[in-house]
Each structure stands twice: as structure tokens, then as C-alpha cells.
Image: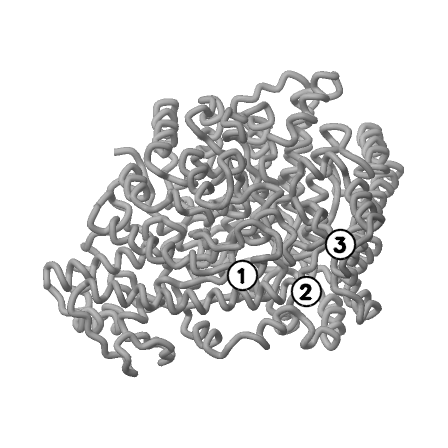
Amino acid sequence: MKETLSFKPASADCDFERIARLQQFMYHRRATICPQRAEIITASYQATEGQPIVLRRARAFAAILSQMTVYVQDDALIVGNQASANFAAPIFPEYSYDWVIDELDQFSQRSGDSFEISDDTKDRLRALAPYWRGRAHKDQVLSQLPPINLQAEKQGVLHRGGISMSGDGHIIPNHQFVLAVGYGGMADIARRHLDAGGLTDEQRDFYNAAIIAMEAALGYIRRLATACADQAEATADARRRAELTRMAATLSDMMTGGARSFYEAVESVYLTHLLMMIESNGHSFSFGRFDQYIYPYYKADLDAGRITREKALEIITHFFIMTNSLNKVRPWDHTQYSGGYPMYSNLMVGGMRPDGTDGTNDISYLCLEAMNQSGLPEPNLSVRFSKDTPDALIRDAARLIRKGFGMPSLFCDEVCIPAMSTLDIDLATARDYASMGCVETAIPGRWGHRATGMTYINFGKILELILNNGTDPATGIQLLSINGRPGRDVEYEDYDQLWQAWRKALNFYMKLAVDCDMICDRSLKYHDADPFASCTVNSCLARGRTLKNGGSEFDYISQSNIGPSVVGDSLAAVKKLVYDDRVLTLDQLRQALDANFQGPDGARIRRLCRQAPKFGNDDDYVDAITADVYESYLELLPHYTTDRQGRGPIGCRYTMSTSNITSYVPNGFEVGATPDGRLAGQPLNEGASPCLGADRDGPTAVINSISKLPNKKMAGGQLLNMRFAPGALAGDDNLDKFIAFIRTMRFKNVFHNQFNIVDTATLKDAKLHPEDHMDLMVRVAGYCALFNTLMPEAQDAIIARTEQGWS
């Protein structure tokens, strides 16, 4: 058993040795490609040509669940598999398929997120290609994108990401509702709507699809029950045989109605998550406020003597471990944006209840201990805290962070709730927020798809363009001329002219990004019609619509904005060096950038650029400029709405997010040298964090700089990542300092913070000798990954982060 946080086991009800075996299995598992889902859905789509898409999707879902391999993981208490093997990635040809065929021979050769694939699997997948040619979601998107959007992508400003080639994901189900009524209950609700009549064709199709999907889910659970019973017969271990027999009995009629016990509730949460991932290959399907909706089942079983605290810990830990059995394969160009096999399955504990009282309970602590025991990347564990959060919860969170898992990340209610209140929701609703995916925030069970993750906008590239009159030095493409003339020549007489050029260019590319969002959304209305997932979110069953057709109660989305700190630092350098101190001309600076600071004069200019004020050091000069960069984007948002406007949901508009996963690394590939002293091709900054190595004045200076940003307007999520030396948290005195630092964030307008507790020497050794660091988990962006699964460029970016300590 690992050293615990504050949990003191008082019985033998938690088998820590079994947990350790499962954990070690997960550390050494291999990612593979599974062809089963692709084959089954192809056959189903061929048989249902001409039918309404939501019915085709439901019938394909039913076919997959009835025909796919079902197995029970050795040692596991929580059961359910996504593919034919643990950590195997199924293929979803309905979203995009050309890249699958193109990359079949490269999957096992990748420098990060590699997948083993057999020759038989390659042959089986190639055989499906003719049917999907021209039929997938990506094909529809590409046929509708204007040429100017494709040119903006070639410039490196826009990147479509997952919205153009995968399912949507990015939802938090209403778990309280799902657990109360079960899959059978949701099917009954759909039947009652059908019986009532007066429906449109769209509604009738949706309700029929919902019934098919829910009955298919119940059938899948019965198959799991049979698998448990079969394994019970085959095992010689009497204890495991009895356990499997009980699991089979529980599963045999589970979710025909509501969950009846703590075990059923946890197993059902896992299965709902799993089934949504089988239905659609979107990611960021998240668990919401797990401690709030699970606690009543725990309390009832505890009071009745049906469970002990130790057994509850074991069940939660198995649930955590099994979420790591799920996987997703992405095209290589998108994998660079999200390295480390992430699923972004956020699970949140703590924080205010809707009535303003503190919601911390025993499950909150058990979740922290479960993550301590599992030590794996999923779920993406987060803790909410406020002035009323018990010191014990923050102390356990700090102890877990000190262990170096990169979890939990921390969200400050005093900042996040006001940010959510900028939307069309009341205070009680805002208090019920949870993190979805990385750091994006949403209201569980009430939001539609995509609180963030729409089109990626490369702020660093826009800066490069305005310094060159809108012309991309790398490609020569000019979509926007700042001075109305072709070519790269442009002069700015003062900083204000430069700033107005930034605003003009940002507005131009924002419009293109919104056009891309709309095209992808409208295509997903068809290709991602998801009756199962939609039924789990408020209002879809009442309206008879899928999420993409306006079924959800609220609808807010955001894009991914990459590099605001690079832009802030660069504009500050230009302002100081060119316009304030006049030690350089803009032309001299541009020539140095073109040469990537090579040569004696280039080196001299780079020194000046690197010495200019940098965000993250509590310097008002640059901090104010960086805040202006945020405000320049925020002021554009009221002009745009989503495709669901007028179809039922409240809101249907944009907010802002700096959740950009690992995209700050490949986006940096697209950007030449920048005036902050950054070299061409190097990473941009991650989230709202300072640029790599720029924060030189300690952790307090970092949060002082962050405090000056418009964080209470960032309803889409604001991300801060920090790295501390392990010694900075060693011992009780240093832990107390760290806890005080966490609590200080409440007064410093810090939306979110997350930490790596690992020294540079360990990271460098892990890159050279991955076999010696199989369990090294790091905070990559808004998620964690095992360090040895990352591509080298992402590893280097983590190594380059400032190693903080106390002065």
C-alpha cells in the first residue's frame, strides 16, 4: 500500500495489493488499434442507407454494443470495455477516414502516442475505405470551407482541430438524473413522448432513436453480466469467484431503473462515460461534481451497514484506474496538439453548493486518496475551493500535489463563479459549475457540446503577420494588408498604430474562425447525432432534439486562443525598445527577426529583447499590455452567436478560454522569431502561463501578474501552469507555505492553478532513460500524461518551464 494522505485504513475491506497490480498493469499496457467498431458501423450504415441519421446512429450504436468483444479486466471491480483490448483505440470512420488509411504504416513509428497495429488490422481497415470515401464529416467540412479559410490555415493562423474530423464530446451528463431514472427510465420517458403525439418528424425520430440507444445500453450491461458469470466459473480463486458472481447478479438488471447502491452508482457513472465514448469519438466527456451526486448513495449504504469507508475507497480507486483503459487515436497533425493519449475526463470535488454553503464531504477526501493510490492520468482530477473550504481538504490536495502526480488542479470559486455569472445564468446556477475537459467550465447536465475547443487561433502568428503588413514570411500568403498595399513593408509611427493593427488583424481572423466553427457545427448536426449522450443532458428529452440541434438547456462555446503571453511580451518589447527608449528602429528589429537573431547584431538585439519586461514578474508595464491582448479578444465576442440560436438553448454565444492543450508547441512551429527574444519554431506560452523561462521573480510574482488579467470574464476557462522544485514542498513548514500560497489565490483573482512538482534533472533523465521512469506523470497542459508517452518537443517544453521555489 502506498503512503496515504490523511486516510487511515481501519479494516481489510480495501485490497491495496490488488490495486497495485492493476496500477502496474496500466503503467505497462500498450496502445493498439482495434478494427471492430469500424467494421460494425460500416455494415450498419450500409444497411440503413436513406434512413434519418439519428436512427442510423442509434441502430449502429446498438449493433456495436451487441457485436463487439466484451471482457472483464483481471482484478477489476469496475467493468466495461470500449474496444477488444485494454487501451485499444477503436476507429470512427464516420467522422474522418482518409488519414487512418494514410497513416496505417506510421502508427507504430510515432515519436509520441504510438499505436501497435497488426497486418490483419491494416487489411481489415483498408477494406472499408471505399465505402467511406467522400461520406465522412471531414469530407463535408472541407467541401464547404471557403478558400480564404484554407489559406489562413496554410499561414498557420487557424487550425480546425477535432471539430472537423471527430465527434464533439465536451459534455458533462446530468449524472444525478441518469442515476435516478436509469437507462430504462430514459427509454420510458421517450415512449411517453411518442404516446402523447403531436410531434414533428425530427422529434419522433429522436425519441425512437433514444429508445433504441437505451435498450442497446441495457443489452450491453447484460453482456457484461454474462462475462462476469463466465469468468466466475473459470476462476479457481474462491474469493474472486464469489466477487464476480455478485457483480454478475448486480449487472443483470442494473440501470433498468435507478441505481440502488453506491457500487451501482459508481459502476453506472463509468458505464455512462464509456458508452458515450463508444457512440462518439469526441473526448472531454467529464464526470462533473462527483462528490455531490455520489455522496447520497455512499451515505445510505454506510448508514445501513452495507459498505465501509475502506470498501468505498477501493471501488472509487478501481473506477479511477479503469478510466485509463480507454483510448483514442488522432491524426498525427492533431496528436501534436494533444500529446500523451489524453481523454480529458475531468472529475471535480469540493466547492460551493448552489445555496452558497460548502459542499465538501467524505467522497471529496476519498477521491483524493483514490488518485493517490492509482497515480494515473485519468480522470483529470480537480478541486474547487473557497473561503469556506475545510483546511483538511486543501491540505490533502497539497499533499497529493507534493507527490508529483500533477493533480489535482485547483479552481477558485471566488473567481470562477463571477466569471460564470457573466453569462445568462443566475448565481445559484453559476455556483454549480464544474470543469469539463482541461480547465473549461460548464454547468453539469445543462450545457451543450464544446465549452471550448472550437477553432484554434494562433495569436503568435497574427503578431508576426502585423509586423509584416499581413504577409506570412514563410509562405508569402497575404490575406490582409494593414496599409492597403501588397508586400511586407509597413511602418508604424507609434505604439498606438501598432496596437490598432493588432486589433484589425485579430478581428479579421476571428471572423474566419467563427465561419469555420459554424461550418463544422452544421456538419456535426448530421454526423454527430448522438441520441444516447443527448438524453443525459437537460432539455434534450423534453424538446426531442439532439445536442447539436439545440437540445441543451444552455449553449456557450469558446475557441482556443494560443500565445497571449508571447504577444504581450512582444508588444511590450517593441513599445519599450522602439517607441519609448528608441534603442532600435522597427526595421532593425524586423531584420533581426527575419534572421532568427543570427549574427553579431542579431545576438545584440536578442539580448535587448530578452531583457525587456516579461509577463509573470509583477511588472505593470508588460502586465497591462498582456491584459489588453485579452480584452481585444473579449470585445469581439458579443458580435457572434452559435448555430443553435433560436432553437431553444439559452445563450448561444461565445466566451473566452485559454485552454489550448499542447497546441502551444506545434503552433510555435508555425511562428518565426518574435520580439520577446523567442527563437523561430520554439513553443508559444501555454494557456495564460508566462512564456517558458520568462518568470524569474518567484511564484508570488507570477500570480500577481495573473491577477491583472480579466479572469472574471473568462467563463470558458483560464489556465495557469507552474513547476516547483520538490524541495520547495518538502517538510511540514514548506507544505504550510504552499497551502498559504494556494489560499492566496482567492485574493489574487486567480481562476485556476496546477502544478508539476519535479526537478529539471529528473525530467532530463526521464527523457534519456524512459524505462527507469515508467510512472513519471506530469502536468502537460490542462491534463496529465505519463512523461514517456509525449513527443520530444512536448517533453522539452515541460523541461523549459521555470523551476520555482520560495525566496
Left or right, 107 with respect to 35, comes to left
Residue name at image x 80 percent, y 71 percent: 50
Please name which of the two marks, 2 or 3, marks the residue nearer to the observer: 2
Task: Give x and y (percent) for residue 379.
Answer: 58, 42
Q: Earlier in the sequence, mark 2 or mark 3?
A: 3
**Residue 600 visible:** no
Mark 1 residue crowding within 10 angstroms, few (<14) / some (14–19) / many (20+): many
**Picture quadrant where residue 464 is located:** bottom left
Q: Which residue is mark 1?
A: 335
Q: Which residue is mark 2?
A: 526
Task: Give x and y (percent) for residue 568.
Answer: 28, 56
Amino acid, disc 3: Ser
Helix, strand or loop status at disc 3: loop
Amino acid, disc 1: Thr
Left or right, 94 with respect to 668, comes to right
Residue at the front extreme, as displayed: 198
Amino acid, disc 2: Tyr
For residue 84, the mark is 3
Quarter of the image with the C terminus is top left
